[in-house]
């Protein structure tokens, strides 16, 4: 069965290619003599329909097939590469724990009736979650999961009123420094589609739940197979 894929029709690939090729901070990194390129700049923010994000990319197990070689990229850095993500490795975004919890809470489920609660209190899993722009909590008690639920509801209410804005605009509005909870949602693209990588799992889940049709994302990895150039110059 062919898997669903995100589509790239609403991304300005020509503009993105120009910005990559103008970047003065492209550094080659070789895996089995196959290069991928880590980039310090540019930060590329584009707007997409969140419904086109089908898969999430886990930090440790995701792989790229590039010229017949399997590569485990350094997900801590933005990078460009050839080849495609191996979709068989990737979980569906709709099935991630955070996405499920957001959907359950916004559907009106009590915090203690969620799958996350079951995993923590019945199966003994240790789970850490964000509770705001600069705080997080390891959920160990009922009060923790209720606080987490309240955070999700407040965030959903805020997004429903003003939508999502790029992080630099948000920080300007809030007069706050950059941190992981105000950073842009990070995504990857290859010829098969658009993928969530990190930052903003809650925001993306809420955007999907609310049916937003256009949100800002920052491109974290980009496949050169989208472009005519073989490599950055």
Image (cartoon, grey):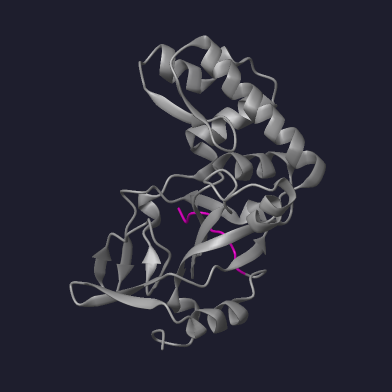
Q: Residue at x 55, y 42 (%)?
A: 201
Q: Position of residue 216 (x, y in %)?
A: 66, 58
The residue lying toward the viewer, choosing from 178 and 41, is 178
Q: Position of residue 163 (x, y in %)?
A: 76, 47
Q: Residue at x 52, y 44 (%)?
A: 93
The residue lying toward the viewer, choosing from 83 and 77, is 77
Quarter holding the C terminus is: bottom left
151 versus 166 height, above or below: above
Q: Residue at x 39, y 67 (%)?
A: 84
Determine if the magenta segment contains residue 6.
yes
Q: Is residue 67 visible?
A: no
Q: Residue at x 56, y 43 (%)?
A: 181
Q: Position of residue 138 (x, y in %)?
A: 43, 23
The residue lying toward the viewer, choosing from 187 and 103, is 187
Instruction: List the single residue furthest toward the right.
Output: 161
Main secondary structure type of the part rendered in magenta: loop
* Magenta-highlighted residues: 1-8
Indicate left or right for 18 with 48 as reference. left
Determine if the magenta segment contains residue 20.
no
Q: Is residue 105 visible?
A: yes
- Image quadrant of residue 30? bottom left
138 versus 79 height, above or below: above
Q: Position of residue 159 (x, y in %)?
A: 74, 41
Indicate left or right for 36 with 106 as reference. left
């Amino acid at each position: 069965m062919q898997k669903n894929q995100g589509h790239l029709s609403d991304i300005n690939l020509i503009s993105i290619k120009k910005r990559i090729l103008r970047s003065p901070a492209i550094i080659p990194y070789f895996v089995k003599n196959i290069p991928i390129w880590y980039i310090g700049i540019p930060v590329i923010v584009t707007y997409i329909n969140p419904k086109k994000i089908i898969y999430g990319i886990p930090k440790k197990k995701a792989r790229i097939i590039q010229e017949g070689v399997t590569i485990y990229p350094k997900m801590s850095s933005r990078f460009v590469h050839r080849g495609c993500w191996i979709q068989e490795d990737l979980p569906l975004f709709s099935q991630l724990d955070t996405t499920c919890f957001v959907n359950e809470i916004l559907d009106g489920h009590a915090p203690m009736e969620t799958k996350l609660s079951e995993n923590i209190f019945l199966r003994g899993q240790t789970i850490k979650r964000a509770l705001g722009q600069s705080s997080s909590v390891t959920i160990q008690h009922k009060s923790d999961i209720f606080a987490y639920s309240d955070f999700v509801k407040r965030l959903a209410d805020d997004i429903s009123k003003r939508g999502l804005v790029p992080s630099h605009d948000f920080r300007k509005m809030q007069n706050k420094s950059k941190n992981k909870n105000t950073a842009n949602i990070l995504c990857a693209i290859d010829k098969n589609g658009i993928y969530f990588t990190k930052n903003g799992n809650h925001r993306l889940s809420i955007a999907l739940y609310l049916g937003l049709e256009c949100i800002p994302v920052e491109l974290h990895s980009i496949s050169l197979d989208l472009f005519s150039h073989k490599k950055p110059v």
